[in-house]
Amino acid sequence: MRYCGKLELALAFVATLSAASLPATADAQGFSDDRSSMEGPGFKAGRLVLHPGLSLEGGYDSNVFLQDTNEADSFILRLVGYLDVATEGTERQSQGDSNEAEPQKIQFRGGIGAQYYHYFLDRIPDNLGADAHIDLSYNPSKVFSLQVRDIFRRTVRPFSDPNTVQGATVSYGHNSNAATLDLVGRSKSQVLEGRVGYTNAVEFFDASIYQYGNSMTHRVPVSLAWRFFPTSALIYTFDYARQQFQNPDQVLASATLLSNNNRISNLIGYNGAITERFSFTAMIGYAAGFYDRDLAEDYDGVIARLDTRWRPRPTITLVAGFDRDYRPSFIGNYTLANRLYANVRFTLAGALQLGVKTWVSFDRSGLALSPDGTLLGNQPNREDTRVYAGIFGEYRFKAWLALFGEIGYLADFTEFQYLGGAPLLDPSANYQRFDAWLGLRVFY
């Protein structure tokens, strides 16, 4: 594998870790969010390849509203459809008269998807989730190149207490969009690569009672990578973000104190392959956040990331790591999270794929206050231990037809008790949830 590919993977890995600049709620969109890893040969249309897909899924959620008492369970019907479009890969292009394909000046991948949810619970109306993405690179292998990306996601699964005046009519629609422009420069030897960019990220909610969380974030990410072995690189990243809430009057009347803020973070570390079977990323750095409102608590401290990947056999992949990061939060404005994770995935007979995914996170919020300055709960800071464990599998009857299933357990353990009555954008108490999905997927 050429080094430039390794370098792009390294920077993509760092960019993915840095992308969590906005608060988010977990909401699975289907069996896998990475559709490119599951697509078939596609339909060729000129220099583009079309990859459609459709799945019908049945699920069960044991704790729909993430409550510690009076849990409400429900069966769920989910219908997922998507269409992805991409330029031809060099491997497919070279399957003609020429032995070697010319590097493409423009590389493009995009797509749209929709997820229809029907809960067999009267308190939740039917709703439609959605996603869309564009990733365009101009001159990707040249000294100077340009990359344009846009990612939109709409999730609709409940994320908090249903104690709302609207009752069953409330929508849990959570919408986010991030548009990024990156300028990339490389040395002719491909030893050095740097990039500087701008990201505009917006986040907004359907229901008026949750719109105090609507915000816009301006980010300026910078990164530099230096190759010192064929498959190794030293990486440095810097990120500045300015977050502004879009409804000041609602923020002042909300259940929790929120503040416009400036955040900076930087990381330095190593990414590379030690052997053909083992690779890792190790980074350490510093982050700080400064909040406009006097009552809001600032933060600063060390952040770190460690990700190890081992492939003892071509059909087995093991991933394990540690992540310490400051993240935006609707309680206390930020959360310091220390997360350990481990995943394993293996393939049997080329048709059956199985996997296990686990993580545990030890989280501590900033000073959790109401807008009037009183404590939001029974403790100054919210501290949580969050745990997830899941298993999944997929069996391919044909190259275009697959049966898949997933079982997951999610739990939050905390002594923090919310004292207010207004609705929160975060689960307000201890909770445990089991969910299971079984579906049939058609794709090409």
Image (cartoon, rainbow, N blue to C red):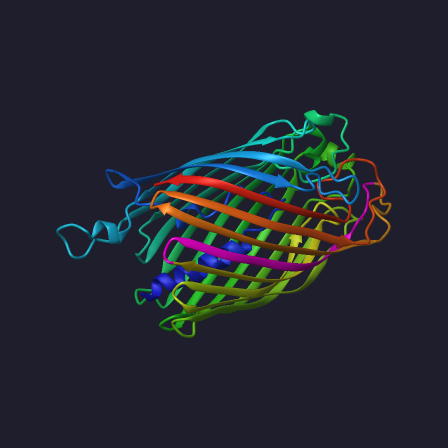
| Quadrant housing residue 418 | top right
Q: Is residue 87 left or right of residue 221?
A: left
Residue 275 higher or lower than 190, as above or below: below
Picture residue at 51% right of the left edge, 62% below the top: 344
Q: Is residue 120 left or right of residue 17?
A: right
Majority secondary structure of magenta residues: strand
- Res 23 visible: no
Picture residue at 83% right of the left edge, 36% below the top: 421
Residue 171's spot in the image, x, y percent? 65, 29
Residue 291's spot in the image, x, y percent? 71, 50
Q: Indicate the quadrant containing the C terminus: top left, top right, bottom left or bottom right.
A: top left
> Can residue 359 be found in the magenta stretch?
yes
Residue 270's spot in the image, x, y percent? 49, 70
Span of residues in magenta: 349-371
Residue 401's spot in the image, x, y percent? 38, 42
Q: Indicate the quadrant containing the N terminus: top left, top right, bottom left or bottom right.
A: bottom left
Instruction: Give the camera-side residue of 28 and 403.
Output: 403
- Res 225 visible: yes
Instruction: Give the camera-side residue of 410 and 110.
Output: 410
Instruction: Give the camera-side residue of 83 and 104.
Output: 83
Picture residue at 56% right of the left edge, 56% below the top: 239
> Can residue 142 be found in the magenta stretch?
no
